[in-house]
Image (tube, rainbow, N blue to C red):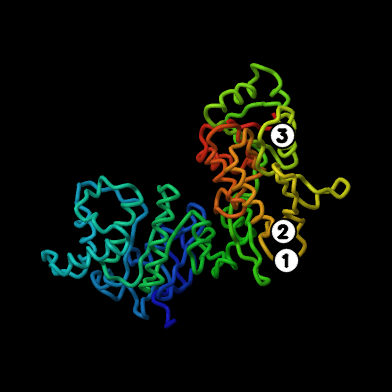
Amino acid sequence: MSGPKLQATGLSFGYDPARPVVKDVSFHVDAGEVVFLLGHNGSGKTSLLACLSGAQRAGAGRVTIDGRDVHAMAPTERAQRIGMIPQLHVAVFGYDVLDVVLMGRAPHLATFSAPTREDRAIALESLDRVGLAGFHDRRYTQLSGGERQLVLVARGLTQRCDVLLMDEPDAHLDPRNQLRVLEVVETLAREHRLSFVVSSHAPNSALMFADRVLLLRRGRTLALGSVEETLTEALLSEAYAMPTEVVTKTVNGHRMPRAILPRRIDRVPEAIATMTLDPGALERPGSVLATLVQASRTQPQRILVTGSRGSGKSRWCERLVEMARRRDWRIAGVLSPPVMDGDRKVGIDLLDLASGERQRLADVRRGAGEGTTTERWRFEDATLAWGNDVLRRASQSLPQLLVVDELGPLELQRDVGLSAGIAAIDGVQQGLACVVVRPSLLDVALKRWPDAVVVDVED
């Protein structure tokens, strides 16, 4: 790589000079690099972007592009080098998509000049590069949020600048469109050497798409470096002033973060309605559980089993399996019974309910080790692969009771780990599907299975 395209040195800025919101921040962005800005609300991300774009003049420090101070450039020249994509763009007029994208050519046009045929060709090429070829005559106001964000990226490309600044491009979008927008960013950086500075509230987006991360805390640099160096539990917990859990995979002695989530919440949020169901009620006609079973003969019924650590979620599922076996049900899926040394939990097994085969899933982590890990557990990747095969077979066997114990951050947030469990629960055509979910992930699970019944084993 050549020298940095964009360089910030000792930047400080405040709308009130006596109360700076950006304090002595320095970093650079190389050609083709994606740098994420992370931090809680008020940490200075948007203000820092405003300084980088030249829209705001820093009270101290400077911003340069290829060594030139951005404030030494005329506004049109600066706009030819640096583009800004806002967090939220509300269209007042029903412009065609092509008209919106052509606005990116403004820095290259003389005053009162109209876009030329060449400008239109550049705009159409930009739409094609973000996957929106054929959208040129659509109304911008009629697009989805993700499509509008991609149109703004296309407008930035049409600007033919070297650096694009993006203020929370993954905000206000569903997960599919978040991924779509950021995949385009990654492609443009890798294949076209465009540089990006992206502010975000989503550490998991940085985990997947950042080359480097700048963590901000109260306007100051908390950490700057690679994903592995910055997305640690200690630094993220400090940046967001809340306990954070990082699921990692150790490869060749290096711990690589795989998923980030708030540290385990052991209480079900008050906004989530729960039921008290005793597996023994399966034998009682007219009970809620018996009613669910009756309904499951024509359409699938899903139960999310939750509760704090050690509250007996797996045991609840075991009891339900015992009751189902008395009825000679077809049972499939997996349980994860604990492995105990006296009164201390030292491991987790994975049990195939159809065959009775059992393999060690995880051991208490000692040292770095290899494979997928959390701060507490080291997982056996071979057992994860075996478990996925078990769950794929389970979904094909049309069971009357399907159990998945459990789906955690790897599965629900990154689609790895026992990811076949998600597909199995999704694909249930009839019968009872029972899945263990920790309280901190209930909101994610309920977005996926909104009709599920939530059973809190502590109620």
Evaluate if marks 2 and 3 touch, with contact meaning CB atoms under 8 Å apart.
no
Q: Would you name the residue on which mark 3 appears?
A: 321
- Which residue shows up at 59% across the image and 23% down it? 294
- Along the polypeptide, which appears first: circle 3 or circle 1? 3
Q: Amino acid at mark 2?
A: Arg
Of labels 2 and 3, the one closer to you: 3
Residue lying furthest top: 286
Q: Quadrant of residue 133?
A: bottom left
Locate the N terminus by quadrant: bottom left
**Disc number at residue 369?**
1
Left or right of 99? Residue 287 is: right
Q: Nearer the viewer, residue 44 or 231?
A: 231
Q: CA distance from mark 3 to mark 1?
A: 35 Å
Looking at the image, residue 115 lies above or below residue 284: below
Residue lying furthest right: 342
Evaluate if marks 2 and 1 touch, with contact meaning CB atoms under 8 Å apart.
yes
- Which residue shows up at 37% across the image and 76% down it? 64
Q: CA distance from mark 2 to mark 1?
A: 8 Å
| Mark 1 neighbour class, 10 Å CA radius: few under 14, some 14 to 19, many 20 or more | some
Q: Nearer the viewer, residue 129 or 359?
A: 359
